Image: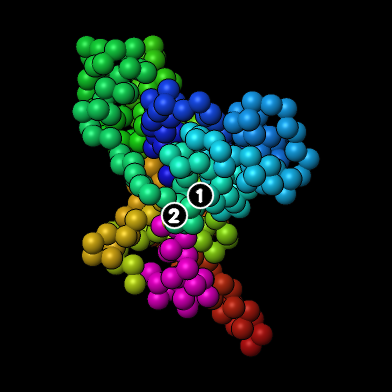
Amino acid sequence: MGGIGKTTLAKVVYNKLSNEFQDCSFIADIRESSKRKGISCLQNQLILDILKGNNHVSSIDEGIRIMESRFKCKKVLILLDDVDEIDELKTLVGKHDWFKMGSKIIITTRKKSVLDYAEVNCTYELKEITMDKSLILFSRHAFLRDSPLCGYESLSHEVVTTTRGLPLALEVIGSFLWRKKQVIWQDTLKELKEVPHEKVQKKLKISYDALPSKEQQMFLDIACFFIETYSRIASYMWDDCNLHSALGIERLSFMSLIKIGYNHEFIMHDQLRDLGRAIARQEDYHDLMNRSRLWVHEEALKVLQTNKVIVTSIVDLLSFYMISLD
């Protein structure tokens, strides 16, 4: 999941190990860079870092040939940050025998399938940080100290509780609230309870945008209706709608957008839940009848009552027309 601190932790490990290796390379933000610059550009960076020479490659295949033949004698440390596709792994680090024994390759990704393909020796899944540590992290950005200022304790605890241990949210929201008056804090807290802070939402939405349309619909359904619900209940509906529930659930899990609990229930981080509901609201902010999903009881009841009035009006009009004909 985006914003949980994968890159930060990986860089700490990379920097700690770098003194043990002569040849190191850190390729940042591969998901975005590969789209903007192309894989060949990333290959050039990797080759330059490891071989220390100007070996410009003009094609992906050429880059693979150079790395496969010339990296074998190199004991390397490589950090591949935010790998999104298996093809990115194939073209940047290929197979284990590309490198000398003792080499280490660190991979951060949102997709467990990438790690499965890489046949990694060790995996570490980051968890949300605890309440105490969340408050410290938030305070460092909101107050430039390890604890809230006097008078802001209650508000700080509410904000931290709302973010539920997501480091990116704590950092961005804390930075936004720095030196703000309490009235701004209160308004921000109200907004946070409806939807994540704008920058956090944009970051989290990367994973959602990468989903095929069918999985997007399933994600929105879970966010709006099926959190902590037995997964099979939703699957019956999705299968009837030709959404291929088994494949979709697996993909959502690989993307770390949901988890399946011990009782086969859907689990979703609150920030992701709020993101999904914000997307549903954006279908029409003003007219509830134009939204595909309504999860607030009062809003759903309002739409049903409105529809009842419309149906009654049509029936009355038809009755009047029939009476006039007679």
Q: Indicate left or right for 274 with 228 as reference.
A: right
Amino acid marked by disc 2: Glu
Dominant secondary structure of the residues highlighted in magenta in the image: helix
Which residue is nearer to you in this view: 40 or 320? 40
Q: Is the C terminus in the top left, top right, bottom left or bottom right quadrant?
A: bottom right
Determine the secondary structure under disc 2. loop
Where does the magenta region start and end? Answer: 233-253
Instruction: Give the residue furthest to the right.
Output: 58
Q: Is the N terminus in the top left, top right, bottom left or bottom right quadrant?
A: top left
Q: Which mark is residue 119?
A: 2
Distance of label 1 from label 2 (alpha carbons): 9 Å
> Are discs 1 and 2 less than 8 Å apart at CB?
yes
At label 2, counting other C-alpha atoms closer than 10 Å, the crowd grade (few under 14, some 14-19, many 20 or more) is: few
* Residue 181 in picture, x, y percent from top left: 37, 14
Q: Residue at x 50, y 49 (%)?
A: 96
- Which color scheme did the rendering employ for the protein? rainbow
Q: Residue at x 50, y 34 (%)?
A: 76
Amino acid marked by disc 1: His
In the figure, residue 300 lies in which quadrant?
Answer: bottom left
* Residue 26 seen in render: no
> Which residue position is annotated with label 1?
96
Which numbered disc, 1 or 2, marks the residue that appears first in the sequence? 1
